[in-house]
Structure formats: structure tokens, C-alpha cells
Image: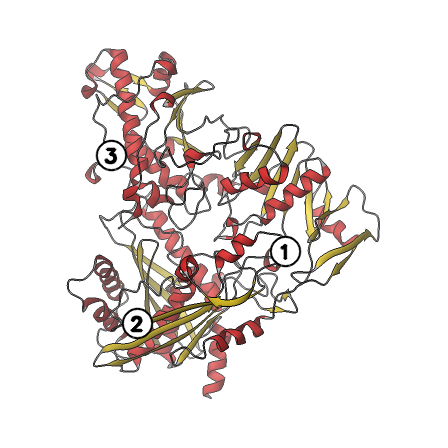
Amino acid sequence: MNKQSSAKIEFNRRQFIHRSGAALAIALSPLVSANHGLSGGGRNNGSYGEAASNGPDIGEGTWLMLHPDNRVTFVLDRIEIGQGITTSHAQMVAEELNMDASDLEVVAAPVGPYYAHPWFRSQMTAGSTSTSAAWLPLRETMAKVRGLILEVAAILWDEDPALLRLESKTIKGPSGRKQTLGELVQQLPADKWPTVSGRVQVTPKLPEQWTQIGKGHQRLDSADKITGVHTYGNDLQLPGMVYAYLLTPAALGDRLESYSWVEAATDYELVPVKDRALAVIGPRWWGARSAAKKAKVSWTKGLRPMDTATIAREHHLMLENQPGSAHYHLPYLPHGALEPLNCTVSVEPGRVRCWVGSQIPQQVRDLLVTMTGYTAEQVDVYTMPVGGSFGRRAALAYVQDAVILALTVNRPVQVMWDRQAEFRMDLYRPMVTAKVGGMVKNGRIQNWSVAVVTSNLGAYIREGYFAAPPRGRGQLTGRGRQQALEGIAELPYDLGASPQLDAQTFEGGIPVGFWRSVGHSTNCFVVESWVDELGASESLDPGQWRLELMSRQQPMTMVQQRAVRVLRTVLTAAGWKMGAFPQAFKQGGRNIGLGVAQSYCFGSFVAIVARVVDDGDGWQLEKLFAVVDCGQVVNPDIVKQQLEGGMLYGLGAMKHQEITFEKGSAQQQEFRTCQALRFYESPEVEVKVLPSLESPGGMGEVGVPAVAPAVANGVFALTGRRVRQLPFLPAFEQAVKVSS
């Protein structure tokens, strides 16, 4: 069951309407309980745009602003990371207000309790939950706003509200009478607007009435991004602002010992960031980067992380006594977002201002309070749009850098990490080693077991930026175990009696964090490859084998029913030959292999078929077929974009990427040595979105997990070689050498 059914709709009647400049602001608390206990704080100003601080003044709890010039502003409580919520949330608002989403202005919410995520109880964007968490509350709230507008108009017109309608920001009544929302705001002061009395029946529109939801709509921010108007954090310019380029140690754990200029660098100065970095500060970032070459910096050897080869050996040792017959191994991975981490901080008398693209703006504000000693009411956090995150901006190191430097130099400071710093100091996706076991007898799985060794994500988040990453090993329990077994513990297959699952942690001092689809990104490769292997041991068609594993239980669960529907659809789309093993055939003189994998995560179901071909020059991925059931769809175009993007992101990681450590230093520090997917490698992609009446699931991460096992299974069908280690290309080459 989707969590959103427990969300509360609560209106603060006494603060429902207030003035914000010349506009009328509608302040609601539709997405959180009014009694969640979070403190308020900060001046309320969260506009995307020029310097962010030049946007509209947003009163506490404001969700909608009606302006005298007939503009309508929607306050978005989540951060736009490229997942398209600026558009999809605007579509939900516009649907209930009977207007087009393109007629809405969308601004970022300030930090405050009214904008806390209803499930996480903190203001954040995470877990592919932005749409699913807002689905009912936002539409119900805006339906009530529609009712309020009609009620106000009915009072002014002395008319039956049932005879009025709201269309395209205009109230229309009998006999052709009209009045725009802007005129309504000018006519009646805010303190004269009534609270919702219930005279007008307001419920969300039914699907058959939708004109915005479920329709493809051009993204509201695409034109500005294409033309360069869109303002990201590192586009920000403030009077008197200086830029900081960071010099960091080659080895994690080393500490700053001494520094000096070898050659004078006019207009630039050296400022330590405690003992973990040295900032070169001056009027231009590129100038600071060039000036850094004139600095002499010495580092003291500290507690460095273990080599990744040593950590991998420890993983295997910890799995020695676990049941099973095969090992799968996945490496540490960087996030690789295109926009570098950046943050701008200005510490002024009585006020701190921070411009940052962060998934956790409430924690940004709390950090600023702790580091500066200012109160929450003296701290402004301006949320900036983000050029990719994939979980990386759910941490605060780059914010801490900016705060420390702003306090030191007494000027606004913008910090931007370069690509090498991002690769060298990332919070990586954890290394995972899994030992799997099981057998097939009479077409049924017996003795299924999966044991994993990974890192405890929570341990790193709790330790904080300046603390050394934890060390040691142990059994995972609670939330740590749940994250380690994501995508393993909730499989829709019949796995026989008493499947055995185990999760352990080994901490080698390499910092880890959340990565796109978290545990599903590693575990789906393990279990979907192993299910394929077990079926192959009995020469079972991989597609039909999966359908049978999900259909034996009668009646099937809702999860199994939806997964079966998705899998059947993708097999048909790909031209799957039911009953055939292996799924390999010749066509037009080419050898072709098909591989399949599926995942269920974040409330959505995805199945992928990879079409792998060999024209005589070795295998290549020709096409990906993907089908998704993500519940009710707000914008099908964005759903397809997210699925396509997720698959290609996962494909690049699967084929090429890894981070290895030697002597405390990451050996891959740029895309040249940790290659993202290139255009020439990108396959054709065909996506189908299934209609559904279920509540929306997430889409920002669900394209990642199943692509790696689908391709690996397709390569097996074509070549007969099974690869159990990523990155795939070097592992496959090694498999070829071993077999030959």
C-alpha cells in the first residue's frame, strides 16, 4: 500500500489568507500534520531565478500566490534536480485550478515546517517520493483553493457559487459575467477573504475530467535551460563576492601541515579550511585555480582508507562460512553529476544567507545555525536548481566549506569543487560482495540464499564531515540491514521454503553515501543474474521461468500481478521466443541474444529486455526495451525521460565505472579514467508506460537497477559467458581469456 494514504489535509483557518506585497498569498499546510513539532525559521524567500533573493517575498506556509496582474505563483516544496517536478507538480496544481501548467510561475519554497516531507518529517527531496507524497494532498488542497475562489466571487457577485466556474485564471458566471483572479485580488482585501466554509463542494477532479494530469506537457524549465537563462548556484554573483578554489590532499585522511606562496599571486590569498583543505580565494574562480599552481602545500599523513583490493579480500573472507556457490562483486562508484558541487554563503550583521542546491535544505539551515551561532530566524537558505545529484547533494561537505571561509574572510564566498575534488572526495556507492546459493529441482527453487557484505550508509551520515569514516566489521541490523538487502528481501518470486538472507558490514575507511536507487542498484544485478543462472542450469527460458516463479502462488499478490503484467508486455515488445533456451537466434546474418531482468522499487515496476548483437566484430548492445508500471502518471513524457535517463546512467556505470583506492588515494579522478556512457555507445531505447489506477510510484531512480543484469543476461545468451563482476567490460574480457 502506498504511504500517501496516511497524509493529512489540515487548513490553518486563522492564517489561511495573508498579504505578501501586493499579492494575495494562500497559506496552507496540506502535506504535513500541523503537530509535527519542527521549528520554523528563516526569512521566507525562495525564488528560483536571478539571485534567488530578488524573487517574491514568500510568507510562512504559502503554497499559492494570486497577483493583481493575474499571475499565479506556485511554491514548490521539493528541489528540482532534473527529475521534472517543476512541471509535474505544476500540472497537478493547474488541474485543480482549471488552468494550463504553463500559466503558473513556480518558485522554490523557503525552509520551514510547512514544507517538511510528510514521510521523512524533514524538508528534503529523496527516495523518488516527490510526486507520490504530493499526489493526493496537493490535489485535494488545490481543489479547496478552487472552492475558496468561487466562494469569494459568489459573495462579491451575490451569486450562487454552484453557478460559477473557474477557467484559465478567470471566474465565469451566468449571463457571461467574468472576472480575472487578479481583479478579484484587487477588489477584496486579504482579511476579507473567508475561510473555507464548505458552501462549495471541493473534491479533486476525476480522471475522466483531467486535462493536465496524464498528458504530455513541455517542461516549464526547458526553454530557460536551453537558452542559458536558467540560474544555477555557480551562476550567482553578489556584490563583493570572492571565489574559492580548493586544494585537497591526494590521499583521504591526510591533513594540512603548512602552506605558502612560491610565487606572488596578485589579488589571491590562501585560507585554510580547518586542516582538511586549503582555499585559494580571489575575484575569479578560474583565476584562483591558476593561482593554486603558485602555492606550496604540505600534508601530514593521516588515517588513510584501506586499499580497495584489501577490502575486497576482507569481503570474501567474511562470506566464507555463508551458504552458496557463487560470488558477485560490484565496485565503489562516484556520482558523476555534471554540475559541480557549489555553495555561496554571506555572513552579515544579524543575518546569514546561503545559496545552494541541496536535497536537504532544512539540514543546511540547521548546519548554518550550528556553525555561525545565529538563530534559525536569522538564517536564509535560497534553494537553487540543480544540474544532477543522484544522491550526492544529500550531504553537506561543500556547505561547510563555504561557511568556514565566509566566517574567515568576512565577505560573501562561493565555493565550487572541481571535477578532481568531486571524484577524490565523493561519498561513493558502497562496494558490495554477495555470495549466492540455491538449486532448481522439478522446476522449483530450493535452498535459496543471498549473503552480502557492504557498508553501513547510516554510519557515515552520522559521523559528520570532519570525522574519520568508521572502521570495523559486524552484522547489520535495523535500517542498515534493510538498506543492504533492498531488492533482495522483497522479490516477487517463489523462492521455496525459508530462503536465507544475511547482511554484514565491513568499513575500510572509504566514505560512502546514497547513490541513485541505493541498494537496488547493486542487488538487482546479483539476484536477477542468479535467477537467470539457476534457470539456465535446467535450460529454462529466462522469461517464462520468471513468469512461472511469480504466478505459482494463487491468488497472486498485487505486487506479483503488476510485475507479471509488466514482464509479459516487455517480452512481447522485444519479440521474445517463449520456451526457447537460450534466447539466441540468427537474423539477417547476425547473431542475436536477448536478456531480461526486472525490478520493483520505489513503488514502481520495471522490466527490461536487452538485445545484444554480434556482427562478427564482437558483441554490442543494440537496443533496450523497457516497460514501466509506475501507477497513475502525471506526465508520461517525463516518465519516459526518467526511465531512459536512468537506464543510460546505469549502463555507463555497469560497463565502465569503478573507483579504486591505493595508499589512500582514488585512482580515478575524472571522466577520462572513470568513463560515463558515450553517445556512440548508447543503444536505441524503446519505452512503454502502462496505464494504471494505482497511486503513483517513483521514477527518478527506477531505470537504473535492471539494466545491468538485463545486458549481462543478454551477453550470456549470445556468448555463453557469465560475468559476475562489474565493471562489465574488463570483467568480460577476463572471462574470455579464462575460457580460451
Q: Is residue 706 above or below residue 698?
A: below
> How much space separates mark 3 and mark 2, taking CA atoms?
44 Å
> Seen in the image, is 414 located left or right of residue 101?
right
Q: Which residue is mark 2?
A: 499
334 sits left or right of 620 in the view: right
Q: Which mark is residue 421?
A: 1
What residue is drawn where x is 39% and y is 62%? 705
Of circles 3 and 2, the one toward us is 2
- Confirm whether residue 295 shows in the render: no
If you read the primary sequence from the N terminus, does the residue marked by circle 3 or circle 1 appear first?
A: 3
Which element carries disc 1, helix, strand or loop? helix
Of pointers 3 and 2, the one earlier in the residue sequence: 3
Q: Which residue is the site of mark 3?
A: 204
The kind of residue tagged 3 is Pro
- How far across and down, in percent of the image, does residue 433 sit? 46, 71
Q: Crowding near pointer 1: few (<14 within 10 Å), some, many (20+)?
A: some
Whole-percent x and y of residue 255?
71, 57
Q: Is residue 236 above or below residue 719?
A: above
Q: Amino acid at mark 1?
A: Ala
x and y percentages locating residue 350 in the rendered image: 63, 28
Q: Nearer the viewer, residue 696 or 656?
A: 696
Q: Nearer the viewer, residue 527 or 150?
A: 527
Distance in Å between CA atoms under marks 3 and 1: 48 Å
| Residue 408 seen from this side | yes
Which image quadrant for residue 242?
top right
Looking at the picture, how far across and down is residue 354, in whole percent? 58, 37
